[in-house]
Amino acid sequence: MTKHDTITAALLVIGEEILSGRTQDENISYIAGSLDRIGVVLSEVRIVPDGIAEIAGAVNSLRQQFDYVLTTGGIGPTHDDVTTDAIATAFDTPIIEEHPHALQAMRECFPGEELGPSLRRMARVPEGAELVPNPISGAPGYMIGNVVVMAGVPQIMRTMMKSVVRRLDTGKRIASRSIRVDAIEGDVALALAGLQAEHPDVKIGSYPYFEPSGYGTYVVLRSTDADLIENAAEALCSLLDNHGTPYAEADAGS
């Protein structure tokens, strides 16, 4: 794991069930948070169906644009789990139909049980890939080039992600500060636009909130430089004071 100034990533969510609305994705926020903690910026999230051409096309597009591409879904035991076929297509590499280390890991998770054809299908791995362990069911994910392939089941994905973050190059950690402003977003929009122009190295986002006690706006300041955040926050507070707008420090996660 090597540290750089800026490392970017994209997430490719694979599955008809996500696009149809039958399943609500639970992985995006966990992956985003895991990457954020090691200084990797999640810059894009894309959702594609379970199609070899669609997955391969998205992977080849994203891996040219970002330092890493992470995928979730499509490496299970059923006929529509075609992610491994798509990754092999994208990298123009053959598939090891029964990777010996993958099979061994699965046998260790289910000692004494016979692995039928469906389960053995999860031991298919593109040639040249490095396995990502799965201590829950044994069936691994893998990393090939700058692409990380993980399960879509949230519990399994999270165990894989803990291993993955130790393998990635990292960037400068992004710090944040959140200020709760007692004004609707439209009333502070122009002031925030001016503030952003004056502080280009700080990302300034505004997020309206609606609560029984009232409504207003959370302003979140993000940067790899804490001093720049502090300068922008002081400028924001000065603007709010000048307009008599109440505000308060808030949790950075707000």
Image (cartoon, rainbow, N blue to C red):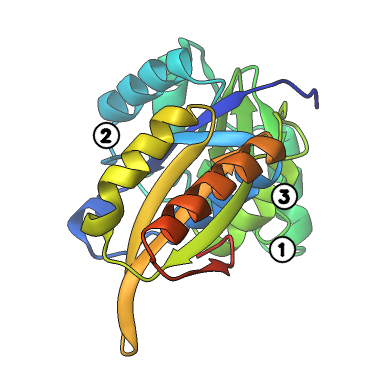
Residue at the (55%, 34%) spot, across then down? 41
Question: Which secondary structure, mark 3?
Answer: helix
Q: Is residue 8 left or right of residue 219?
A: right
Residue at the (75%, 48%) spot, across then down? 105
Mark toward the start of the polypeptide (3 vs 1) = 1
Q: Does 212 sit above or below residue 146?
A: below
Mark toward the start of the polypeptide (3 vs 2) = 2
Q: Does 76 sit above or below residue 194?
A: below
Residue to which mark 1 is pinned: 110
In the picture, residue 188 is in which quadrant?
bottom left
- Residue 72 got which mark? none
Percent x, y for residue 30? Answer: 55, 56
Q: Residues within 10 Å of mark 3 (few under 14, many from 20)?
A: some
Dot 1 amino acid type: Phe
Percent x, y for residue 247? Answer: 47, 68
Dot 3 amino acid type: Lys
Q: Residues within 10 Å of mark 2 (few under 14, many from 20)?
A: some
> Are the residues flagged by discs 2 and 1 in contact, CB closer than 8 Å?
no
Spatial separation of the CA atoms under disc 3 and disc 2: 28 Å
